[in-house]
Each structure stands twice: as C-alpha cells, then as structure tokens.
Image (spheres, rainbow, N blue to C red):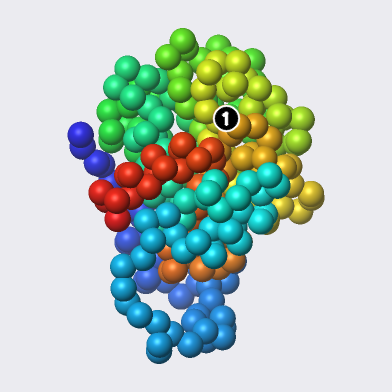
Amino acid sequence: MVFERMPLEVWFDEYQFEVDHDIGESGMKFHSVSDLGIDLNSVELRYGYHLGHPELRSTIAGQYEGRTGENVAVTTGASEGNFALIAHLVGPKDHMIVEHPTYPSLYQVARSLGKDHSLFKLKWENRFKPDFDELRRLIRPNTTLISLTHPNNPCGSVLTTEELKEAVEIAQDAGAYLLVDETYRDMTFKEPPPLAATVGENAISLSSMSKTWGLPGIRIGWVVASESIIQAVRAIREQIT
C-alpha cells in the first residue's frame, strides 16, 4: 500500500497561499467564524460522535426524501467519506469504475489501496456527459462500485434526472453500488437532478460544506446510504479518525 501525492495538491502547496488573487478557486467565498454568528468560547473540546452529532445527521437527512439520521455518516470532508466507501465496498477480488476526469482522490484512493479499478472516460465530443454504453462495457462480474461526480469536477457537466436514474439502474443490474459525489450540486444554474441516495437503495450520496457553503475549514462532509453501509463507515472512522 503506497499513498502517492496528488499532483493537484502539490500545485496547491506551491501556489495557494502565495498569490494575491486566486481565480481558480472552484467554491464560494470563504467565511469566517464571525460571519456565522457562533460563539465558540463555551464549546467543550471533547471527543465527538463517530457518525457525527445526531442533530446534524437528522438535519442533513432532512434534505434526502425517505432518509433518516440513521442513513447519514458525517465525515471529515467528502474525501474521508470516499476513502471509507472504497475501503468497505471494494474487496481484494473486486473491481470498481471511476469517472474521469474527476477530483483525483476519487481514483487515487483506489490506486493507493490496491483496488482493481477502471477509468470511465468523459469525452469532449459528448460534452463531457457519461456514455452509458461505454459504462456497461466496463462492468465486470466482480464490479462492486461505480463512482460518478455530478456536477462534474472539473468539466461541469450535469446529469439529468433520467440519466441519473439510468446510472442507478445500470449499477443495480450489475449488483453494484453507485456512488455520486454531489459536492457541487447546489451550484448549478438549472434545477439539479434528484439526490442520488433518494433514487435507489444501491445509490450513495457524497457531499460536503466545502464548495457551495464556502466552509472548507470546518472539514464537514457526509455520506447518505443504507444503514448497513453507514455502520461500515462508522467502523472505519473508529480506526482512522
């Protein structure tokens, strides 16, 4: 197991804090604690809940029709959620498919953990929308996870409701889970598609406070999935967080 540096983060390390004007930032303007009107003076710096505070979990679940707090795991950013899901859902003899291009950790975690994976390439001629016939060709009998990012980072393509449902059905027919990173969902100019976790039991939503809300510094992300997957995320977080 070898964890390689992400080229994007290497670039960030060199330039992110050295420039006066950053026109490459993909999220909203960053907020300060004073912007939020929160008094932290009386907050106890104690151990927290492994799956996040129950009230926060319930609040997040309220955005996902048919889901409850038991279907939510709060994670240290969306990246930890992605790590936990790949670690749990893709075994030593399993295979996963990752859309590409995408945020590098979505496929580099698979590479670092030694998971067999294929890249599902988005193409210019298709306006960077997924070609589902190509996706079907990439599926193997041992495929257990398909990972998409929509709205896509960095291409910006957005799935329609019909396309999202088709992706869920493709994964379901393969006996696989569909993971959709929805971090940029609320930054679309049109009505976004349904949240993936509300479309099928095999669909998993991944998101965070980092982009739309301009709060990357608080390191809050979440996974919305079946209760069994949430409990698996708990077990992993108990050991790494």
- Quarter of the image that includes the C terminus: bottom left
User: Which quarter of the picture shows residue 89?
Assistant: top left
Q: Is residue 26 above or below residue 18?
A: above
* Residue at position x 38%, y 27% in the image: 90
Q: In this view, does 67 lie above or below 74?
A: above
- Point out residue 39 in the picture as x, y percentages from the top left corner: 48, 87
* Residue at position x 76%, y 36% in the image: 161
* Residue at position x 28%, y 35% in the image: 112
Residue nearer the viewer, 199 or 106 = 199
| Left or right, residue 160 beside residue 105 | right
Secondary structure of the residue carrying tag 1 is loop
- Numbered disc total: 1
- Point out residue 111 in the picture as x, y percentages from the top left corner: 32, 32
Can the viewer see residue 184?
no
- Point out residue 207 in the picture as x, y percentages from the top left corner: 54, 51
Residue at the farthest left position: 1
Can the viewer see residue 95?
yes
- Quarter of the image that includes the N terminus: top left
* Residue at position x 56%, y 53% in the image: 69
Q: Which amino acid does label 1 sit on?
A: Asn
Residue nearer the viewer, 75 or 113 = 75
Residue at the farthest right position: 190
Residue nearer the viewer, 114 or 199 = 199
The residue identified by callout 1 is 202
- Point out residue 158 in the picture as x, y percentages from the top left corner: 69, 41
Q: Mark 1, residues whose alpha carbon is within 10 Å: few (<14), some, or many (≥20)?
A: many
User: Which quarter of the picture shows residue 104?
Assistant: top left
Residue nearer the viewer, 126 or 70 = 70
